[in-house]
Image (cartoon, helix red, strand yellow):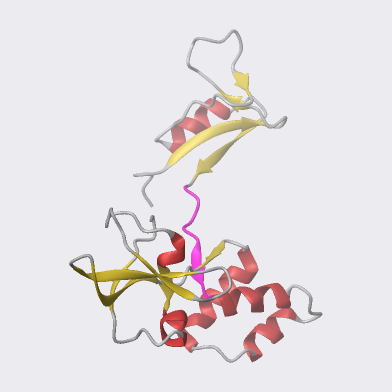
Amino acid sequence: MTDEGKMYAVKNDEGEWMSLDGTQTGIWYSNNPTLFKDKSYAEAQSMGRRAHVVELTEAPAKVVVSKLMDRLIKEAHQKRQPIEFLFACSIPDGDQEDLLYAYATGNYKVEKPKRWNVKVPKKWSGDDKHYWTKEKDGALTWAYLINNDYMIPAQQFTAAEIEHYGLGECERVEVDEHD
């Protein structure tokens, strides 16, 4: 097994890191570790110092789960037999592993539903495209945009909302997740 791409640090029994940068008067600090690319070199530095080598790893990427899976995970935490509960849930086989990983590690995030800006034909001021806007009461109104690069959240619709409002035949532009 190779050390390539791995990093190591040395930590003592008090939870302090070894620092060999030469700017300090001692070698043990809580937040200033010296990093080693070679594990054997780090082990040599730890000898006789009541310390151990720690392999530093990047945090694993969070698994993305649906809102349903998030609800099931939260419900499982309330059960006496959570794993049996999760195995009994009716979800696609490919999602079962993600569901169990998310439950066991807590390392997950809930997927955001895709959203679209919906263009609806209307002749007004010489422009034949305008955007629908949702009002707080659920009603739809027209919104003429001066800057087509900026869309407010009220002009963004989920697939369920597009179906609910009967806008399936209208032109739509998917909203970037960062918008």
Q: Nearer the viewer, residue 25 or 92?
A: 92
Q: Is residue 34 magenta?
A: no
Q: Position of residue 118 (x, y in %)?
A: 33, 73
Q: Is residue 68 left or right of residue 57?
A: right
Q: What is the residue that sits farthest to the right in this orientation?
A: 80
Report the magenta stretch's main SS.
loop
In magenta segment, residue 61:
yes
The answer to which image quadrant residue 75 occupies is bottom right
Which quadrant of the structure image shows residue 19? Answer: top right
Against 159, is 21 above or below?
Answer: above
152 vs 69: above or below: above
Residue in view at x 41 percent, y 81 percent: 162
Front one among 66 and 145: 145
* Image quarter hosting the C terminus: bottom left
**Horizontal side of residue 10 vs 71, given as left or right:** left
Please report the bounds of the magenta region as a residue range: 58-66
Expressed as whole percent of the image width and height from the top left, the position of residue 125 reads 22, 65
Q: Residue at x 72, y 29 (%)?
A: 14
The spot of residue 108 in percent (x, y) is: 55, 64
